Image (tube, helix red, strand yellow):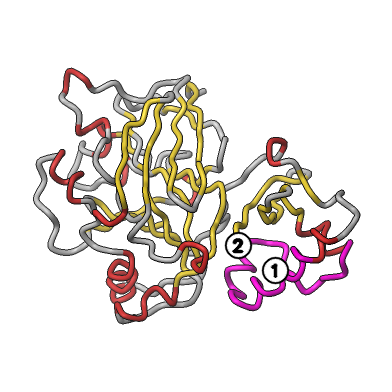
Amino acid sequence: MKLLTFLKEGNHALGIKTDKGIIDVEAASKLTSQTEAPTDIMDVIQQSEAAVKALAALEEAALSSEDSSVLLDEEGVTFAPCVTRPSKIICVGLNYRKHADETNSPYPKTPILFNKFSNALAGHQEPVAVPRVTEKLDYEAELTIVIGKRAKNVDRAEALQYVFGYCNGNDLSARDLQLRTAQWMLGKTCDGFAPIGPYLVTADEVGDPNDLEIKTILNGEVRQQSNTADMIFHCDEIVSYISQHMTLEPGDIIMTGTPEGVIMGYPEDKQEWIKPGDVVTIEIEKLGSLTNRFVADE
């Protein structure tokens, strides 16, 4: 199932992507009397399998109804971040072999973790401001894990059972700020620096998360093109590792690292950093395309 959050009268609303359009879950619940279906993405994640089952029944009823008023044209939808209120945004650095190679960095022996905050969240098609304080803004295509069950001290063999689903992510990075000190946080969590979406795709539709094509397109030019198989630490290992050090809660998101092709990896004379007017699209197999246009900071 492909879920999304969109804006409806200024508030977050839950949608289901279908071949016929986006189902407005709240409207469909009233039309079909499927009132047990949750209407908030965080409730869906919390309720997990029961919620997905209820939404599947609602989807079937809505699509079989002669009333198409609950179906929205995706082109007219204003997307919000597909996960709206994560308690944690955890990121993994240097987690693709070829990305480590292009930055002349040794392969980490354990996952390198850092964080972003909720101010960094942005949705599909949402404009992202280039901060005045950076001259070196970079893209990073990332498979993003969304936790579905409370996870503490989880074994690697069971780790993916705690995953609700996956989405596209862009770990935007102000490289001059990131490398100003030994701590990366300043360059990683400016406003809008964690676009996610457009959809949250349930784990059953994704299958093996470490066999997905992943790419970044900048102004129509493919800049990153790889496969999640190149990860140094695979998704199950990442979830298990983090759970040994902190409890993961439903709705927490984990950005799992980026492949080669970032601007920082180019020769210095070819580094053209993101600027206002640029458009970046992150594409991951089975997850759709996440696009953001960059604008000047006000």
* Secondary structure state at the residue bearing disc 2: loop
Which amino acid type is shown beneath numbered disc 1?
Ala
Foreground: 221 or 273?
221
Magenta stretch, overall SS: helix
Q: Is residue 33 left or right of residue 98?
A: right
Residue at (31, 50) in percent of width and height: 227
User: Which x, y percent locates residue 41?
Assistant: 63, 61
Report, in whole angstroms, how far the alpha carbon at label 1 lies from the one at label 2. Answer: 8 Å
The residue under label 1 is 56
Going from N to C along the chain, the mark reached first, 1 or 2, is 2
Q: Is residue 26 left or right of residue 127?
A: right
Residue at (24, 41) in percent of width and height: 260
User: Which x, y percent locates residue 172?
Assistant: 37, 39
User: Which x, y percent locates residue 2?
Assistant: 60, 57
Q: Are marks 1 and 2 in contact (CB under 8 Å)?
A: yes
Q: Is residue 36 in the magenta section?
A: yes
Snapshot quadrant of residue 111: bottom left
Residue at (81, 66) in percent of width and height: 61
* Secondary structure state at the residue bearing disc 1: helix
Q: What number is the disc on residue 68?
A: none
Snapshot quadrant of residue 65: bottom right
The residue under label 2 is 1
Q: Label 1: few (<14), some or many (≥20) within 10 Å?
A: some
Which amino acid type is shown beneath numbered disc 2?
Met
- Up-down relation of residue 21 to residue 269 (above or below): below
User: Image quadrant for the N terminus?
Assistant: bottom right
User: Which x, y percent locates residue 245?
Assistant: 29, 73
Q: Which residues are magenta?
A: 31-60
- Up-down relation of residue 267 to residue 199 (above or below): above
Q: Label 2: few (<14), some or many (≥20) within 10 Å?
A: some
Q: Is residue 283 in the magenta section?
A: no
